[in-house]
Amino acid sequence: MKLNTLILAAAALFAAPAFAHDDATLDAMAAPHGGQLRMSGAWHLELVLAKDARGDTAAPVRVYLSDHGGKPMPVAGASGSAVLLSPAGKQSVVLAAAGDRLEGKARYAADPAMKVVVTLKFADGQTETARFEPFRAR
């Protein structure tokens, strides 16, 4: 009986980090592509915006998918949108599969006040949404 209790305690101890997927924990993690990580359903979404964007030309809006272990997930058949909210206004961007990511373009400035809502739709009809503050100091 003591062995079972010890095994359960050890399993809980090692499993605890897997459940720590709040925004603060994700912000402390190094994102593979230099963006900001958020969790939505079974996925980690990484939003990558151009850190030097000034709003005068279109810049990329990229979203990468990975599982909870950080393994990249295919984006074939997925689509989505990103709504960029900033002091300059609101704009929607269509995201389409582009190799290992979903991508679109928009005119935006790298503003710490910007918030972004990403909504993805998968081939099976499942949707996921995540909220980001990509230029907020972390």
Image (cartoon, rainbow, N blue to C red):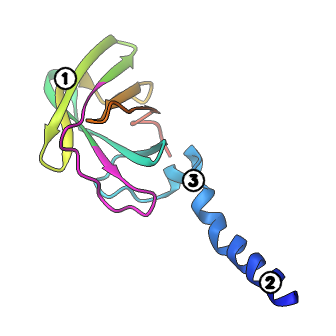
Residue 50 % position (x, y): 23, 38
**Picture quarter containing residue 51?**
top left
**Picture quarter containing residue 82?**
top left
Find disc 3 in the rendering and name its residue.
25
- Nearer-the-camera pick, 8 or 119: 8
Q: Main secondary structure of the magenta part?
A: loop
The amino acid at mark 1 is Ala
Q: CA distance from mark 3 to mark 1?
A: 29 Å
Q: Residue drawn 61% across and 64% down? A: 17
The amino acid at mark 3 is Thr
Label 3 with label 1: CB-CB less than 8 Å = no
Q: What segment carries the magenta color?
A: 64-81
Q: Residue at the far top: name it.
A: 89
**Side (left or right) of 58 relative to 25:** left
Residue 102 % position (x, y): 21, 38
Find disc 1 in the rendering and name its residue.
106
**Under tag 2, what secondary structure?**
helix
Q: Residue drawn 72% across and 80% down? A: 10
Q: Residue at the far bottom: name it.
A: 3
Which labelled disc corresponds to residue 4? Answer: 2
The amino acid at mark 2 is Asn
Q: CA distance from mark 1 to mark 2?
A: 56 Å
**Side (left or right) of 22 relative to 97:** right
Callout 2: few (<14), some (14-19), or many (20+) C-alpha neighbours within 10 Å?
A: few
Residue 94 % position (x, y): 21, 23
Above or below residue 72? Residue 87 is above
**Under tag 3, what secondary structure?**
helix
Residue 100: say if magenta: no
Q: CA distance from mark 2 to mark 3?
A: 31 Å
**Side (left or right) of 94 relative to 113:** left
